[in-house]
Amino acid sequence: MTAILVSVVGVLGTVMGAALTAFVAARTEQRRERSQARVQLNDLRVEHQRWRRERRQAAYVSFLEALGTADRDNQAFFRELRAVRAPLPLDETRVAAIRLKFKEAEGAGLLVILEGPEAVAKGAQNLVDQLSSLVQHVRDYAEVVAKASPGTGGDSVHEVGMGFIAERRVFLALARGALDDVAKRVQVLPETRSRD
């Protein structure tokens, strides 16, 4: 009887040991799978952040290039108007070309607004508004030159131009901050803790 009891206890011990080993192996496998899932999720987050930064940077650069093109043409037109010594008819073709370049900059600004973040979107809208005002002031000055004595006035154009420059600096700081923020997130993404 003792031999039977010893063999039953031995079999039960073997079965319990096998069950415990299987349980530990299953838990280890679950942890490994969760760990792999966290790594894959983290890799996806990093890749998304890189993609987001590249999209934003491309939108910001495109916007600034379009703004620069419109602003340079507008400035050149204003300088030419300031150099005129006799009344000059309004160059509607030139005004229309500058307006078209402004519209291109405004379109590029919409992409910046879409890409965000909110502070950069507001900065882009402010910059578009400031350029719109500057283009209008130059057009108004061109009308004055066409009707009256050239070379006078233009101070309001200078003031609005300085406002545009200041607004562009604000936008650049906001855009740089947004791009740096995305880069920081790529470098340090929080690890999700497993709940065992």
Image (spheres, helix red, strand yellow):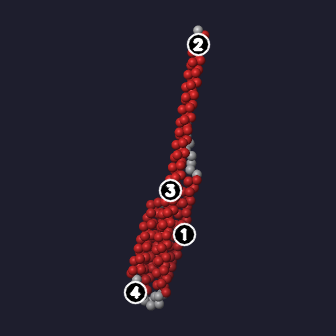
Name the residue rendered at 43%, 73% in the picture. 101
Instruction: Check disc 3 and report its element: helix, strand or loop.
Output: helix
Name the residue rendered at 57%, 31% in the picture. 24
Q: Where residue 124 appears, x then y in whole percent?
A: 48, 66
Left or right: 142 in relation to 42: left
Residue linked to disc 4? 89
Indicate the quadrant where residue 106 lies: bottom left
Furthest residue toward top: 1
Instruction: Check disc 2 and report its element: helix, strand or loop.
Output: helix
Tag 2 or tag 3, which sits nearer the N-term? 2
Disc sitting over residue 51 in the figure: 3
Q: Quadrant of the N terminus?
A: top right
Disc 3, disc 4: CB below 8 Å?
no
Tag 2 or tag 1, which sits nearer the N-term? 2
Mark 3 vs mark 1: give the one in front: 3
Q: Quadrant of the C terminus?
A: top right
Residue 52 visible: yes
Instruction: Check disc 1 and report its element: helix, strand or loop.
Output: helix
